[in-house]
Amino acid sequence: MAYCTVEEVLGAIKESAYDALLGDEYIGDLEERRRRLVPYVEEAVADADAEIDGYLAKRYDVPMSPAPRVLNKFSKDIAVYNLMSRIGIDEQDRDKTYLNRYQSAIKFLEGVAKGTINIGTGGGGDTQEQAAGRGFQIQSSQRLFSRDTMKGW
């Protein structure tokens, strides 16, 4: 299950960018332009969701279903960045907004992966105990020395 939809991503991109994304060919009909963009958007969404899952897999079962709302926002931001990076992002122009949103999403996801940000359990995520149970564990031999066994030393 995708964290965002193709329509949400298309809605986040200005219609004037459709032509640039499609290349040199001009298509006058807006619906036709959107229809031709769908395969590119689907790929961008799939890549965004795979990137998100890569960060979340350290602490949660992925893909999350239902996903917390914050993942929808970051999935859109990453998918739009993936799409716009096909034509190049000018960091001195308005396009820098796409880069800034992408970097914010990655910073958030890194925080989730490190455990400094918890996206909660309401969206299918694990509790901290469940996540810890899947991660690091130690087993050792029975304790040899204690205060009782060391009396007198």
Image: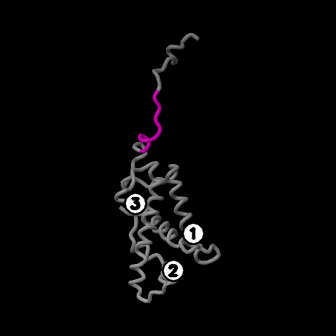
Specify whether residue 90 is in view: yes
The nearer-to-camera label among 3 and 2 is 2
Tell me where residue 133 appears, x and y as whole percent: 41, 40
Instruction: Establish if 29 lies above or below 101.
Output: below
Circle 1 sits on which residue? 99
N-term-proximal mark, 3 vs 1: 3
Disc number for residue 20: none
Q: Nearer the viewer, residue 45 or 33?
A: 33
Tell me where residue 17 appears, x and y as whole percent: 51, 81
Quarter of the image where one finds residue 139: top left
Disc number for residue 23: 2
Q: CA distance from mark 3 to mark 1?
A: 23 Å
N-term-proximal mark, 3 vs 2: 2
Mark 3 and mark 1 residues within 8 Å of each other at the beta carbon: no
Residue 150 lies left or right of residue 44; in this view the side is: right
Q: Residue furthest bottom?
A: 28
Circle 3 sits on which residue? 68
Neighbor class of circle 3 (other Cα within 10 Å; few <14, some 14-19, many 20+) is some
Q: Secondary structure at mark 3?
A: loop
Q: Which residue corresponds to the image point at 55% horizontal and 71% vertical from the top-left? A: 85
Instruction: Establish if 27 lies above or below 61.
Output: below
Tell me where residue 81 appears, x and y as whole percent: 52, 69
Q: Which residue corresponds to the image point at 50% horizontal and 78% vertical from the top-left? A: 21
Instruction: Establish if 13 lies above or below 79.
Output: below
